[in-house]
Image: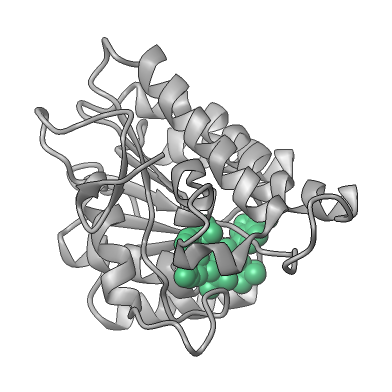
Amino acid sequence: MSNSDKKIALITGANKGIGYEIARQLGKRGYLVLVGSRDKKRGQSATDRLRAEGIDAYLQILDVTHHPSLVRAHDFIRNEYGRLDVLVNNAGVVHDKVLKPSEIPLDTVREAFEPNFFGTIAVTQALLPLLRKSEAGRIVNLSSSLGSLTTLSDPTAFEGEFRLLGYGASKAALNMFTVQLAHELRNTSIKVNSAHPGWIKTDMGGAEAPGTVEEGADTPVWLATLPADGPTGGFFSERKPMLW
Ligand code: NAP
């Protein structure tokens, strides 16, 4: 399976939704894609569908909240390819309903932070040594407009209907990780950016969402394939800067 001539991309939570489509679009561009999935059956089914489209896809079992699976992913990618070119931190959950910040159970907030924030940091820390081996490493963090402090502090904003404290705070914190990691890596060839995919029709986005997964994957794929003079440390939607 080893093919180190191609760029190697790992997408977490790629067994469905936007992550699957990011894997598909990167695969169509000639990347070798590692299909991150915490569940073997769902991950294998997604990988098989990508391979049926001619994409060089391989299943990578990975639960962002389970440290041993991150170590296994690191060791496998190091042994097989010796480097990682793209890491898309796509895996995420929404557990909370619209609840008053004065009443929301702390556990609900913690449940969002565990994968969305801590899990993303853990995956990135585990794989950063391999991204440093790439000529042009790219890290893309799937954030959300619901994590934009500017947007949520506007009482007229459409997003105001979705004041999910756990989810929104976990994505705002994720944006802080983007900014600080990009700063740390500013003198390297690695770029780190956050993407808001739009409101997209997936299991998470729901059936009433207006956007398609193709549209949702566009900005993350653009950030994953940025040229050397592209931005780092930014927050983007529809390939344009977005308010933090
Ligand atoms: P989705 O359809 O619910 O897919 C989420 C993916 O994350 C699934 O593959 C899921 O795996 C995986 N996942 C969850 N917890 C995980 C864990 N601990 N370890 C590994 N994988 C895990 O969601 P989506 O709509 O595609 O969203 C993708 C990303 O975009 C998320 O970060 C989300 O916050 C962000 N986003 C989405 C929207 C939207 O409108 N859809 C808007 C803004 C931002 P399982 O199948 O095993 O559960």
* Quadrant housing the C terminus: top left
Q: Residue at x 16, y 58 (%)?
A: 30
Residue 14 visible, this angle: no
Instruction: Determine whether 208 is above or below 205 in the image.
Output: below
Residue farthest top in this picture: 187
Q: Give how far across and how far down residue 175 sits, in percent.
A: 48, 36
Q: Ligand 1 is found in which quarter of the picture?
A: bottom right
Q: Give how far across and how far down residue 206 sits, in percent.
A: 54, 83
- Could you say which is closer to the camera, residue 221 or residue 61? 221
* Quadrant housing the N terminus: bottom left
Q: Is 48 on the left or on the right of 109, as rendered?
A: left
Q: Residue at x 42, y 26 (%)?
A: 179
Q: Give how far across and how far down residue 7 sits, in percent.
A: 23, 45
Q: Residue at x 55, y 56 (%)?
A: 91
- Could you say which is closer to the camera, residue 158 or residue 182? 158
In the picture, residue 84 is in which quadrant? top left
Instruction: Determine whether 6 is above or below 67 in the image.
Output: below
